[in-house]
Amino acid sequence: MKAAVISFPGSNCDQDAIKAIVSTMQIEADLVWHAHTDLSSYDLILVPGGFSYGDYLRSGAIARFSPVMEAVANEAQRGKFVIGICNGFQILTEAGLLPGALRRNESLQFQCEMAHLVVENASTPFTANYHFREEIIIPIAHGEGNYYADEATLDELVQNDQIVFRYADGHNPNGSVGSIAGIVNKKGNVLGMMPHPERAVHTLLGSDDGSKLFTSMLTTWREMHGVR
Amino acid sequence: MAYGEPSAQEVKDQKIYRTFGLTDAEYDQIVTHMDRLPNYVETGVFSVMWSEHCSYKSSRPVLRRFPTTGERVLQGPGENAGIVDIGDQLAVVFKMESHNHPTAIEPYQGAATGVGGIIRDVFTMGARPIALLNSLRFGTLEDAHNRYLFSHSVAGIGGYGNCIGIPTVGGEVVFDDRYSHNPLVNAMCVGVIVHDKIAKGTASGIGNPVLVVGAKTGRDGIHGATFASTQDPHAKERSAVQVGDPFMEKLLLEACLELIDTGKVVGIQDMGAAGLTSSSAEMASRAGSGLILDVSKVPVRETGMSPYEMMLSESQERMLVVMKRGEEDIAYRIFEKWGLEATVIGQVTDDGFLTIVDGEDIAAKMPVTALVDDAPIANRPSMRPTYLDTLEEVIPASLASTDLHHDLLALLSSPTIASKEWVYNQYDSMVRTETFVRPGSDAAVVGIPDSKKAIALVTDGNGRQVYLDPYEGGAMAVAEAARNLVCSGAKPLAITDCLNYGNPEKAEIFYQFERSIDGLSEACRVLDTPVIGGNVSLYNESHGIDIYPTPIVGMVGLIENREHITTSAVKYVGDVLLLLGEIQPQPKALAGSEYLAIKQPQNALSYAMPAIDLQKEKALQDVTLAAIQQGAVQAAHDLSDGGLLVALAEMGIDGGLGVTVTLPDTTDPLSLTALCFGEQPSRILLEVKPADVEHVQQLADKAGVTCMAIAKVTEQLHFEVQQNTKQILCATLEEITASWRDSIRRQMQ
Amino acid sequence: MKVQAKIFVTLKGSVLDPQGVAVTKALHAMKYEQVEDVRVGKYLEVVFDVENDSQAHELVAKMCDQLLTNPVIEKYTYELVEVLA
């Protein structure tokens, strides 16, 4: 298994993502500059957090037109694992790979803290190693993580079991509808989430609950490819 | 005169130089150095180079008193940032700088560009920035304008640091009306570097090309450097506010580090205050060379800019780079990849002159030594302020606490002591995934990538104490910073400082400045933490009221083994809390305290403080560090604002556990109050397993440090205080947590 | 001809606008009790060359749909002004 971490001008969690992939999955991970157009040799594509293009205009709006995004869409189509974290989630929604949009936090403030999440779907490639309804601690750090989708889209998300993470009871840090923190596409191979699992892979960082998200992908990929 | 500027003769006859802040005597000196009348551009360039902000004319002679050398110091003051060796060919680069005046005018951009500037100072040295800290001072939050300054400054600091992807890991915020409408924003940046990659700000090698890289130049902040050094509010408004672009700086950071890594860079310097003028003059001065620059080649984003405007523009996110001759293409290639400009605008010469041409025309030609080394020194008169001689030595019994419970809650909810979550939750403190201790503990701890080492970082300063006793207060600032580092398990290495004072032309203010520097210096010597850089911010006054003399110490410490990282939160039920240092402070310890400021604000500055014994401080810190390194300490917390009970309460709140305190007997209510809330320096609380108590006590005894078991960690979620088997205070953990945690949020709603 | 499009982007009516809510509250606190609602948006000026008016309208609509707005949460209106040399 091989991973690509996309780097846009202004990405700043790209190195963190590589470190997390290498330390938890023990696989090769390349930093791929946004000008690249071919991602066919990768099994996992991670669109990292940061402020691509300064978040100017709207978060993710400009990055979504980077040359590499066409390749991301192609590989997603082919069933490869794609995960967008924070700014990566914003880019994936702007690109139409995931439904909905991310608005400014209700508090109007950037919010950085340890967030309590509930795993709502433990049968995706990204959550296979968690239990259903497991409560985990993953940090958030964003100013525009307030998830929005219209009623019809929300119904569809629920019906298809596309909601993967919700903020735990009583503390919705940004005003997201239905306390949604992360969703997958209909096919289940593209995940977008505002919390940063790559920041929760070691107890020294305050939590290692994010590790299982990475190892889940490895487990699933091995099962799919008959590798042990 | 294509730009309609006055002639050299007119500058002299109409005394136009005065509008630039030059005195008649300074102008005459310029004429002597130039051996002719300076033209308009030259006069402008001299005025900024000789301003307080660039030349440190008031402070330079006093700053020489700082100890600046040590076996770990690789670079002391004088470069863009100082450098300290941490072993294994690794070094830490850091500096702190003020951005007070721009913040007073436009808090979001003022604070943001302060952060941007200090980050550039660090990566200019070739270092990868890994952490940011901020020391902030505002007037009290009852005032709407102070709330505006506070909230926008915090948003600006977050806006810049979050976007560029450097974690803001610590700092401090103090509220006091002496900073009303004159906020202090001191930003510190810390980077890491491998020894052989260190870059410097020198322009050497005749014929080497000089490049401007980064953002385009506009008319931003012209005369910002001079306006920082004036007390006239109208003059302050004259200058255009600079707007920061953290996205641009992120690209500039990556491009510059990539460029420096090629080994083809001769020198590099941030174009900060006074832009092209000071960066070029300082680079030439360090190398003893000259420069010829053609301002018509500088990429601009506005039309019709004159050489004068080009030289003085403070457009952000720009650097001046000297490359090896013939290697310009490397710079073009790297900067193009990052979508940035890199343009050759001149070259290094050997004539010792800074020559500015505008296409064919010579716009200015000035000796570099005259601009930098010969800048005048203002020998400011210094006079001991009379208030220092009227401070009362005895605190009246009437100031004793009559309700410990009430006073503890009042202290915990005082914004200076209360949780700063409202502030630091707006900062990304975790990006780079090396932040091991986040904001809220005594010091932040950040891992050094690809190494077992970690560094602890802190900023500290207490203006009220420096006001009450400039010498002792200065020493206390250094001692407290070091104590915070030691409590996190680190050995203090060196400091950077931001020296914030009022108007130095007042002899009393200059006395505060001088004496506090003597105190800072002495503490630096005793604690072996040399000064490796910093900055001075004078003229901090609003409506004629000077701020407290507020030197801020930014200190870095080294943790060789990550297992020694210690936080202030209590960990285990049944553990013992040991108090090290003075057990029973005299009532005098209430002078300058937060307790007094709340109890009787009008008299908060009426009493003389106890002095600090630096030898005792050193012994205390050595014992604490030894106990931590021997694995005997579960938590450590320095006693500062609010004294003993506040420190114990904070440890309980952080750990989510109860604490039962057993105080030694006292003879009268005032002594009890001093015991509970006095701010006697040089004290630390250690959480120790019952089995380790004796060992730590022996360590302390051997070093002559007083040590006493003062409290226990309990399962029952209460904060309880007993004395002589009587309960004298009992609060629930929930109650004290709520007072402490929600106070600032409540006031900001 | 050279034209300038003055484009106004706002959140759709059904989407909560936290900035608008905050500004409304602030105005009420400042005793502007008559204020019913505030929506905060963006204003863009785009200058470009076109053959004719209808092409200009077509281009603006395309730019807005593709990049300048997010149709999931935003809507826009615009005015076209001819720029005289």
Image (cartoon, rainbow, N blue to C red):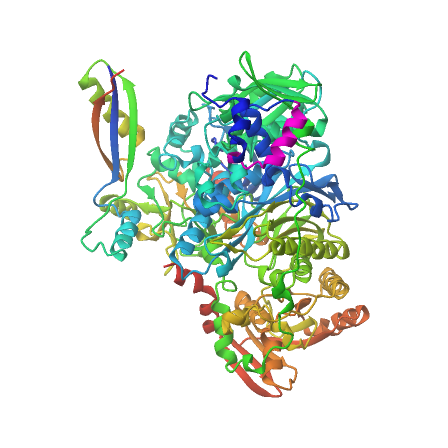
Q: Position of residue B263 (x, y in %)?
A: 68, 25
In reply to whether residue A36 is colored magenta, the answer given is: no
Q: Position of residue B438 (x, y in %)?
A: 55, 54
Extreme residue toward the right, this view: B702
In reply to whether residue B33 is colored magenta, the answer given is: yes
B602 left or right of C38 in image:
right
Q: What residue range appears in magenta?
A: B19-35
A32 left or right of B90 in image:
left
Count of labels shown?
Answer: 0
Task: State the residue in front, B180 or A34.
Answer: B180
Q: Position of residue B218 (x, y in %)?
A: 46, 27
Q: Is residue C37 above or below residue A78?
A: below
Q: Is residue B371 something one can see in this rendering?
A: yes
Extreme residue toward the top, this view: B360
Task: Identify the residue shown where x is 45% and y is 29%.
Answer: B219
Q: Position of residue A61 (x, y in %)?
A: 36, 33
Extreme residue toward the bottom, this view: B725
A149 left or right of B334 in image:
left
Task: State the residue in front, B384 or B681.
Answer: B384
The secondary structure that most of the magenta stretch takes on is: helix
Q: Is residue A31 something one can see in this rendering?
A: no
Q: Quadrant of the N terminus of chain C?
A: top left
Task: Identify the residue shown where x is 58% and y is 48%.
Answer: B538
